[in-house]
Image (tube, rainbow, N blue to C red):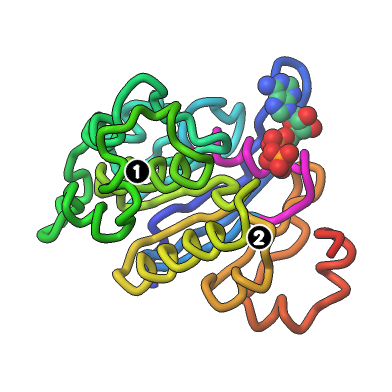
Amino acid sequence: MSALLQIENLETFYGASQVLFGVSLEVGQGQVATLLGRNGMGKTTTVRSIMGLTPARRGHIRFAGRPIEALAPEQIAALGIALVPEGRQIFPNLTVEENLIAFAANRSQSPDPWTLRRVYGLFPRLQERRHHLGHQLSGGEQQMLAIGRALMTNPRLLILDEATEGLAPLLREEIWRVLRLLKEGGQTILVIDKYLERLFPLADRHTILERGRVVWQGTSEELKARPEVWKRYLSV
Ligand SMILES: Nc1ncnc2c1ncn2[C@@H]1O[C@H](COP(=O)(O)OP(=O)(O)OP(=O)(O)O)[C@@H](O)[C@H]1O
């Protein structure tokens, strides 16, 4: 399986403070990969470096074989990487439907692209609320909207940063259901989350970060067999 995303020896700083110390990982085409680790270990920073929001000072990022570490965030997005950020960041004063079409594009040149109709099929709740403003939605609805908006760009790689954070259990399950469907449809996904029992059946590969360094990488089978690794790095 060819790597869609390849990250090599990423070193990222906030001002003088170094946060990533040589992070390397790969996400294969059609794979679901995770970034795991306790709070503050560098997961969001890794994603921000991929997106060009906090560019890495050293290291390489290749997307579909092309170096992207020197590109601006909008150029990276245009190549087909969509981020569902922590905190969702939907437009509060646009309606659900306006949020969904704001960045609509067919960046993966899919023959069967995501459309409003398909997104509403995935999240019927969004169709019911399509004329509501972003700020009128519940946290779970905002999360669905953030995912729907990312899908409307038809990304080659979808990145979700803590998409189930702060959601009630039923809403979390709704997000997991959608991620399973996306995987079945061949969507490549990089996911940051902490629910190992949901990530095990979904994900092909896991990368654990500890203070900005990769301390473990492997498959779900391998991670399942290593509870001491979860205890040490994920405090579960
Ligand atoms: N804008 C910033 N300026 C300075 N330091 C920052 C900034 N953002 C994050 N950091 C620091 O960088 C380190 C990594 O943070 P990061 O958000 O990448 O971690 P994380 O693993 O995603 O955790 P969380 O789940 O809490 O978001 C932390 O020590 C954090 O305090």
As drawn, is 12 to the left or to the right of 215?
A: left
**Ligand 1: which quarter?**
top right
**Mark count:** 2
Instruction: Name the kind of residue labelled 1 in the image.
Output: Ala
- How far apart, in angstroms, are the residues tagged by discs 1 and 2? 23 Å
Q: Earlier in the sequence, mark 1 or mark 2?
A: 1
Task: Identify residue for label 2.
Answer: 207
Q: Is residue 213 left or right of residue 142?
A: right
What residue is drawn where x is 78% and y is 58%? 215
Task: Please say whether residue 74 is visible from this viewpoint.
Answer: yes
The crowding category of the residue bearing disc 2, from other C-alpha atoms within 10 Å (few below 14, some 14 to 19, many at least 20), is: many
Determine whether the residue tagged by mark 2 lies in a helix, strand or loop. strand
Neighbours of disc 1 within 10 Å: few (<14), some (14-19), many (20+)? many
- Start-end of magenta stretch: 36-50
Q: Position of residue 33 (x, y in %)?
A: 53, 62
In the rendered image, which residue does mark 1 sit on? 150
Tell whether 147 sits left or right of 218.
left
Q: Nearer the viewer, residue 118 or 196?
A: 118
Q: Hey, which quadrant is residue 91 in on the image?
A: top left
- Kind of residue sitting beneath label 2: Thr
Q: Give the numbered dot on residue 80.
A: none
